[in-house]
Image: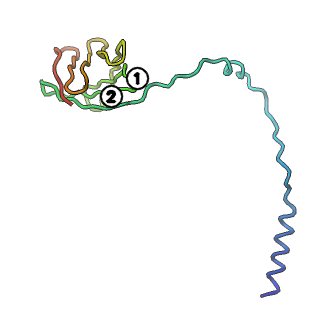
C-alpha cells in the first residue's frame, strides 16, 4: 500500500506537466455589419418602473387599481384587478394624470378619479 502512493504522485505530476501554460489564441469571426450603426445610435432610455401600486375604493363602491410609475408623470389605471391597463400621463410631475376621459388627481389618498361614463368621485386607498 505504501509503495502505491509515490507511484500515484509521480503519475499525477506527469499528467499535469503535459498541460500548456500559454494563453489561448482568440480568433475573430467576421466583422459586425452593424458596428458603425450601433456605435452612433442614440442612448436607450428604459421605461419607468412601478413606484407604487394602489387600490382605491370609490364613493360608488367601485374599485380602481392604479400603478404609479417612477417618473411621477405616468400611471397605469385598471378598473378590474387583472384588467387591461390604461396609460395616463401628466404634463408635469405631480400634475393630474389624464387620457381619453380618464383622470386621476390628488396627492395620494384620497384622490379624485374620473372614468368614462361616470362623474369624478373621491376614492380612498
Dot 1 falls on a residue whose secondary structure is loop
Q: Which residue lies furthest to the left in this view?
A: 60
Residue in the picture at 74% in, 26% down: 32
Q: How crowded is mark 2: few (under 14 residues within 10 Å), some or many (20 or more)?
A: many
Residue 113: x and y in percent read 22, 19
Residue in the picture at 60% in, 17% down: 42
Which is more toward the observer, 83 or 91?
Answer: 91
Residue 24: x and y in percent read 82, 46
Q: In which quarter of the image is residue 6?
A: bottom right
Residue 75: x and y in percent read 34, 23
In the rendered image, the quadrant that contains the N terminus is bottom right
Q: Residue furthest bottom?
A: 1
* Residue at the spot of label 2: 67
* Residue at the spot of label 1: 71
Number of labelled discs?
A: 2
Which is more toward the observer, 7 or 81?
Answer: 7
In the rendered image, the quadrant that contains the C terminus is top left
Amino acid at each position: 500500500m505504501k509503495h502505491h502512493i509515490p507511484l500515484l504522485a509521480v503519475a499525477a505530476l506527469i499528467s499535469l506537466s503535459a498541460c500548456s501554460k500559454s494563453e489561448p489564441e482568440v480568433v475573430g469571426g467576421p466583422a459586425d455589419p452593424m458596428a458603425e450603426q450601433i456605435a452612433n445610435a442614440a442612448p436607450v432610455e428604459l421605461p419607468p418602473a412601478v413606484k407604487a401600486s394602489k387600490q382605491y375604493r370609490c364613493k360608488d363602491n367601485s374599485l380602481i387599481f392604479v400603478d404609479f410609475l417612477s417618473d411621477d408623470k405616468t400611471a397605469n389605471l385598471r378598473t378590474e384587478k387583472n384588467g387591461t391597463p390604461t396609460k395616463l400621463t401628466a404634463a408635469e410631475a405631480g400634475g393630474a394624470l389624464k387620457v381619453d376621459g380618464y383622470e386621476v388627481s390628488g396627492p395620494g389618498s384620497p384622490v379624485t378619479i374620473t372614468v368614462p361614463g361616470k362623474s369624478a368621485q373621491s376614492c380612498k386607498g
